[in-house]
Amino acid sequence: MPRDRSLMSTSFLGLLATQLLGATNDNILRWLVIGIGKDFAEVNVSRLLAMGTAVFVAPYILLAAPAGYLADRFSKRQVIVYCKIGEAVIMTLAVAGILFGEVWFMLLVLSLAGAQAALFGPAKLGSIPEMVDPSRISAANGLIGLTTVFSTMVGTFVGSLLADRTGDKGQEHWQWSAVVLLGIAGAGWATSLLIKRYPPGDSTRRFPWDMAQQTWRDLKSLAHTGTMLRVAMGIMFFWTLAALAHLNIDQFVFESGGARQTQVAPMLAALVIGIGVGSVLAGIWSKGRVELGILPLGALGLVAVPILLYTIEGNLFDASGEWTASYIAACGLLFLLGCSAGLFDVPLASYMQHYSPTDRRGSVLAASNLLTFGGMLLAALAFGVMRMPVHDGSLKNVTAQFADDPQSVKLAESLWSQFKTEQAAGRKIDIEAIVEEHPEKEALVVRDVYTEFTGHPLLSARQIFFICGMLTVPVLIYIVVLIPQATIRFIAWLLTHTFYKVRTYGMLNLPEEGPALLAPNHVTWLDGLLLVAVSPRPVRLIVSRNLIESRWMRGLARIMGVIPIWGGPKAVRSAIDTAREALNRGELVCIFPEGRISHSGQLQTFKPGVLEILKGADAAVVPVYLDELWGSIFSLRGGKLFWRWPKLGPRSVSIWYGSPLPEPKTVYDIRNAVQALGAEAVTRRKQRVMVLPRLMIRKCRKAMFRWKIADSSGQSLSGAQILMRSLILRRLLLREVLSKTAAEEKYVGVLLPPSNGAVLVNTALTLAGRVACNLNYTVSADVMNKCIAKAGIKHVLTSRKVMDKLGMQINAQVILLEDFKDKVT
């Protein structure tokens, strides 16, 4: 792959850094404005939160058409650079708003930041397919998702910290805010210059002055392709659900015994870290393609985890404010929820970018953003309705809860009277300030009294989580029904890569589109599953009907488009015709030309049916060779399947794709191509064999704390002990005994019985670049000395016990290993 199309290209790294800095600055500004807004007594906090969300999200809806126009009409690099300049101007206005002390002006600035982000989004996402190879789009989206999560965490923390540390209304130390906001904006502009300029998608496009109509046209353009619309709706559903869950975490904590805002942070951190992990996993598991088969796994998590959160019982904190087991369980579940979210979102975003038309990619992404942020606004409205107080609370509920603590009951009664007085005077109840005035145990009472005083909502936070899970059930069912083959293919990939370490070679020989007939050798029962798992496209296997006789296997085969074949001329002809029709539709078909699993591991005679399929089909044959599978429990080595214990750990497997054969004349042409691939595979496998010292080091590192060797003395050594002692002995030998270079002393004698010590000496000599010559201690002194002279051995490593027992004269310098004990430093 060209370096300028890889994930390490300057352009993509520049985009990644620009995205990271921009999203961080947006979150810093958002939470700084919200934090400063709380210092204004006349501003209702909940109203401020709602307004802050609305003014930031609204531009995504209002500016969908201009955002798409800019991303298509101009080079996306140009749009990104100018957006970063705009960000610097907006941050300057934000600092001015802090100095003016006008919260509504700051909300206006926040709206401008939302507008800048709305214009930046389509250009950012649309540039990914331009700057990275198609096989890296999923991984690129995983990294973008990871940077988004990281920037959200950092931005939220820094914004809240600035709001706390810059004094009343952010004016006492406003310089800190200016340095942070403008500094990050400047750094983002600098990184945007690293992005390479690519040609615009449609340089003739005109500005959409009729924005509403253009937005409608963009939506219709998106809906024109049913698949694109379904993907956009999936993205919208995900972000709607994510917004609802994010808003609900805060209330979940306070309903479960939380009293301070800091108690929410670990849960939010667990969620966003999970999203980052899920995004990266989705990029890794996609294996260089857009893998929609991951979606059901993500959707399953989005169903199960919220329902499990609903089942968590009891308070999350004890009386002293410490975490309970329920809190830890909730954090773990939120982490899994985040992982599921990442697995759900990345394949959809990758598909949208990869398959959207180049000349209309900006418009398509802008229309998708419109749906997404429209859904997020609906989520905010729905959350407001579900959390609307509809049931009156009662002081008795609090006093009953703390009946055993008279001091808490007295505090509850006092707070109830205080709240009634504040309400009668028309003043805002600053619950956060009141909580901060009380110690941890009393803060819990304050929260409970406030909750009862303001009334119970329509739905509890746990019930909202349950609704989120249940809403995803039909989505999960729809995904499985809509893309069953992709789902099964991904499950096959997951299973095969769990038990096998699969390497693929020559994947570029597999056409991205159009027909091809795969012709592999047949070594094991799992060959077809492996080919389906590694192929970026669906593969229709030609399989003996005997293998799919059971009802569930027939159903699975029907979903996978398997072409069954059985005895009888008519049945064979029908299967050949079906395969030919599939090729004429541009599909991939796989036939095992040998007709059966090999009994010897060697390539067998090819049957002529492969050529019959090609008659009347404009398709090439792609030879395939499956290597390193012979000897597995699924092969016929020994005469039958499953007769031996499986090898522990993942087994290495190589799959080789050869150059397509446009018009093979005979089956021998195809067989020779497969055989040539096999020869190449064996040659490459030999090159991959690891030299013994390196293999020894690797095995010892894997068994660092497990015993690796033992001898008759009862002593055992772990991998770490072998490595440590061998390296120490190597250093002592080079320093005290051996010649400086291997050329001066290549062979070194070893006179030791089979033992741990002999292993350490042999390992140390090998690591020192010398050849260990293990001398036979059962021969006579004359024979041994002749061997020593023949090999040119200068030193013999042994022990005092061995020399005392043998009592022979050796014609070389004898080194007693016991003497090294005092020389270790």
Image (cartoon, rainbow, N blue to C red):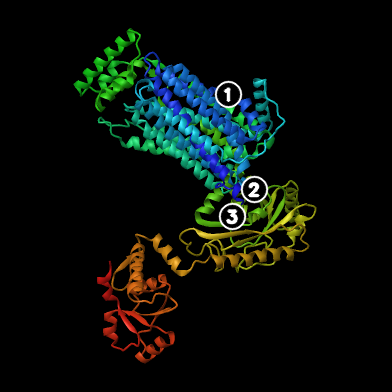
Name the residue type under label 2: Arg
| Nearer to the camera, 346 or 745 | 745
| Depth order, front residue of 604/379 | 379
The Cα atoms of the two marked residues, 1 and 3, are separated by 45 Å
The Cα–Cα distance between marks 1 and 2, rounded to whole angstroms, is 36 Å
The image position of residue 427, as x and y in percent, is: 34, 11
Q: Which residue is labeled 2 in the image? A: 537
Report the side of 450 relative to 271 (left or right).
left
Helix, strand or loop status at disc 3: helix
At label 1, the amino acid type is: Ile
- Residue that label 1 marks: 61
Mark 3 Cα-neighbour bin, 10 Å: few <14, some 14–19, many ≥20 = many
Q: Which of marks 2 and 3 is in front?
A: 2
Q: How far apart are marks 2 and 3 (CA)?
A: 13 Å
- Local crowd size for mark 1, using a 10 Å CA cut-off: few (<14), some (14–19), many (≥20): many
Count neighbours of disc 2 (C-alpha within 10 A) and say few if under 14, some if 14 to 19, many if 20 or more: some
Of circles 1 and 3, the one toward us is 1
| Picture disc at residue 183 | none
Label 1 SS = helix
